[in-house]
């Protein structure tokens, strides 16, 4: 499957649940806001890691996001604390889009294809490693 990586996001190798793969990284406020908007597909182990300066309750929404996604929230120790399945915002007015909040304060968020965390048996407490 062709890669859906955008050219203006840095890429980093990460490990999670015994798998090592490359994801795009969003570190600036502008990158956080754009995220995976307008993507029509992603490869099986492609995704985006959001890195924030501090830990707080995180809220994601699917504005202009054309594909369903799974999101894993990680605390400052890079431990998985929450996973949510997010529905595409395609055709949904902004005011009607749900917000997907982390269950606890999070410093990192990893967006992957829908069901990715379950499919790969990634459980709460799993540790994320950035290479």
Image (spheres, rainbow, N blue to C red):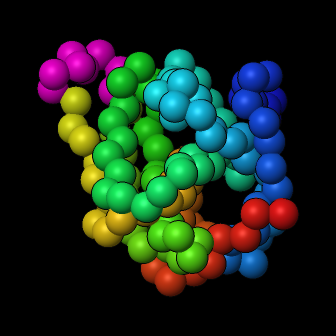
- Range drawn in magenta: 89-96
Q: Give percent across and percent down for residue 112.
A: 57, 49
The vertical placement of 75 against 107, above or below, is below
Label tally: 0
Q: Give percent across and percent down for residue 120.
A: 61, 70
Magenta stretch: residue 3 in it? no
Q: Nearer the viewer, residue 63 or 55?
A: 55
Image quarter for residue 13? Answer: bottom right
Q: Nearer the viewer, residue 40 or 38?
A: 38
Task: Single out the residue that lies furthest toward the bottom.
Answer: 125
Q: Residue at x 43, y 61 (%)?
A: 55
User: Which quadrant of the figure contains the C terminus?
Assistant: bottom right
Magenta stretch: residue 91 in it? yes
Q: Nearer the viewer, residue 57 or 15?
A: 57
Q: Give percent across and percent down for residue 27.
A: 62, 40
Q: Give percent across and percent down for residue 111.
A: 54, 48
Name the chief secondary structure element in magenta.
loop
Residue 101 shows in this picture:
yes
Image-based side of 76 in relation to 120, left or right: left
Q: Residue at x 57, y 76 (%)?
A: 77
Task: Single out the residue that lies furthest toward the left.
Answer: 96
Q: Residue at x 68, y 42 (%)?
A: 25
User: Which quadrant of the figure contains the N terminus?
Assistant: top right
Q: Nearer the viewer, residue 68 or 124?
A: 124
Q: Residue at x 36, y 58 (%)?
A: 56
The vertical placement of 105 against 25, above or below, is below
Residue 118 shows in this picture:
no
């Amino acid at each position: 499957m062709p890669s859906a990586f955008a050219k203006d996001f840095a890429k980093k190798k990460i490990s999670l649940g015994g798998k090592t793969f490359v994801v795009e990284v969003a570190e600036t406020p502008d990158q956080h806001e754009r995220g995976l908007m307008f993507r029509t597909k992603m490869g099986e182990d492609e995704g985006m890691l959001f890195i924030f300066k501090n830990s707080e309750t995180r809220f994601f929404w699917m504005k202009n996001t054309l594909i369903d996604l799974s999101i894993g929230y990680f605390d400052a120790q890079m431990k998985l604390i929450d996973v949510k399945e997010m529905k595409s915002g395609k055709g949904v007015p902004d005011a009607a889009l749900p917000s997907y909040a982390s269950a606890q304060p999070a410093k990192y968020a990893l967006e992957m294809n829908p069901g990715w965390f379950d499919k790969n048996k990634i459980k709460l407490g799993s540790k994320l490693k950035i290479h």
